[in-house]
Image (cartoon, grey):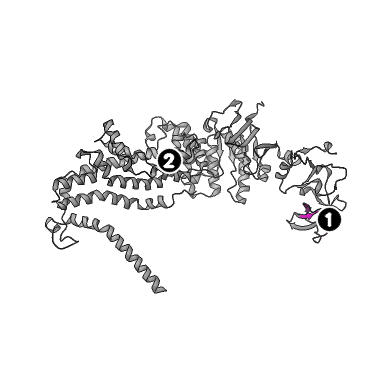
Amino acid sequence: MNSETVLELREVTRRFGTQTVLDAIDVAVREGSFTALLGASGCGKSTTLRIMAGLDRPTKGKVLLNGTDVADRTAHERNVAMVFQSYALYPHLTVFQNIALPLTMRHLGAFGRLPFAGRLAPGTTDARDLIRRKVAVTAESLGLSDLLHRKPNSLSGGQKQRVALGRALVRDPVMFLLDEPLSNLDARLRVKMRGELISLHKRTGRAFVYVTHDQAEAMAMADQIIVMIAGKVAQAGTPRDLYDRPASRDVAAFVGTNAINLIAPEDGPSFFEGNTGDAVIGIRPEHLSPANDGALGARLETAEFLGSETILGLRTDQGKEIVAIAPGDYSVPAPGSEIRLGVAADRLHFFDPASGKRLEREHVR
Amino acid sequence: MRLGTLLGRCLSLGLLVLGALAVLLPFLWMISLAFKPQDEIFSATVQLLPSRIEWANFVKALTETDVPRYLFNGAVVVLGILVFQILFAVPCAYALAQRRFKGRTVIFALTLAALLVPFHVTAIPIFLGFAQAGILNTYWALILPFVPTAFGIFLFRQFLAQVPSELFDAARVDGLSETEIVWRIAFPLALPAATAFAIFSITAHWNDLFWPLIATTDPNLATPPRGILYFRDEESGDDVGPLMAAAALITAPLVIAFLLAQRKFTQGLATGGLKG
């Protein structure tokens, strides 16, 4: 095992009844990395995160934290922090108490934690001071100092998110697990919090595991993306790997702002010079643009002008819909006119039509 | 059309007033008698308002009889029942609502079924059991039969089932044990439900005559309704004024408690949910 690996899942399988949610997945998270678990809902990414946290147990397989098997340890004993999609703040506690709770559990004994009698417990004054100091520092760093006495109900979505982060930060965990933490925020705030999360990651230097179904979020933030499809790891790699060399048709379809064009052999004659055999061809819309000597011809149906670019919706003679992107200064011809489209040879992806797996260029005949 | 709605309203209002009067009349009569001097109580004419306020009835009820003792017993029994009910019902409800275990649905179904069993069915077996155990004529005999409460478990479980499970996961990550989750997180959240439940429980057991009549014979353990019965025997129905004063004293704590908790009570029943 790599000494830098902080957390590793080995052949982890999780079944609920007869349903297999995770099927022998292997995941490694490097120290200090920002790993995104990317997938559609129901693909098992949240279950993976819960197994990492210790909130769920694998049916089979091992969970290694810094090289030791932690299958029997609770989330608290693993000292991992988790941020939930709904923030999961305790509604009956103030912001201060919410952030302080993990410290209270760690530093005060069972008697010292009692609501009122605890103040009488001997030797808790120092612990209480320590907790107060740590919470103050954390709150300061997140801009929550003025809100410490408020209840979560009176906070905005962004503030709640910060409190949830504060509760995770205050205990100095070995790693952070985040379950779609931004999906309840509005679009503008989401972009802002994205930046804050990245700087938080840099500041703490801890490994972050980030569950999301939004590929743009994963691409923007992560240095490692694990794409999960139907309970399996479809591909793990850097954002660039995923974009440039998707391991399968499904990964290719998932990654990228504009959905990739997948052209099966029956969708049209081979337009690409040279024989592509019976492979499915994938071309990202941003790599397919109008060119007078282009290899592909199609009729224009729609055009969306976005300023910096224009998204063209076209249809081939065989009836296959494809999308291409033209530069913003492209003058759009009348709908129905034939347009030639060109693509650089190294931007083409080939997939096996049966298995959906990526075919390397030399294997394509 | 307008006349029709007006008539309809008058009719429904009239019916409501009649219903309220029918319910309140014995109560008002009790208050009236409690404040009447001895000679006015048995006068031939019906007079709701006493000619003068007579406090002697209350003084007599409080000083010459065991009413303070009955009130104290009532408080011990009612609070004892409530504390133990909550102590057991909340963890059970939490387990039923938020934990996964084998047979959970069966156990919940049994809890629902237990709601349908009237207490009178189990009273005799419990009485025989207590007799064997030799705890009849103790406070425990009055408290223990009501500690397992299917209604309480059901009420709390419905409330806790609405709390997002992420909240409890967060508590686990923060290092709380399941027991601590119940008392530090689940119970404070379920406080509105607890208030509603407390009102039900306190009213039912403060007013209960059936079980104290069976389980105790010791006058020193008599709860208020049981005590009133002794009162009547002693006085042979002659001293109605103090009897009514005692009855008023015994209902007063409930009325006051309900008035104080009224808003929380309706809140707990109406919303039952948790937002934010």
Quarter occupied by the N terminus of chain B: bottom left
Residue B185 visible in this rendered orientation of the protein = no
Marks 1 and 2 share the same chain: no
Circle 1 sits on which residue? Answer: A339
| Tag 2: amino acid | Leu
Residue A360 left/right relative to A40: right
* Range drawn in magenta: A312-341
What residue is shown at x 77% (from left), y 49% (from top)?
Answer: A285
Identify the subunit bearing mark 2. Answer: B
Q: Chain of mark 1?
A: A
Locate residue B200 relative to residue B179 in the image: left or right. Answer: left
Q: Position of residue A242 (x, y in %)?
A: 72, 40
A349 is within the stretch colored magenta? no
| Residue B201 place in picture, x, y as percent | 33, 45
Check disc 2 and report its element: helix, strand or loop: helix
Dot 1, how many residues are within 10 Å of its Cα: few (below 14), some (14-19), or many (20+)?
A: many
Specify the label residue B110 is tagged with. 2
Label 1 SS: strand
Q: Position of residue B233 (x, y in %)?
A: 16, 46
Front residue of A257 and A114: A257
Q: Indicate the quadrant where residue B82 lies.
A: top left
Q: Please indicate, yes or no, whether residue A159 appears anywhere in the rendered image.
A: yes
Residue B165 lies, in percent from the top left, at 51, 42
On whether residue A316 falls in the magenta region, the answer is yes
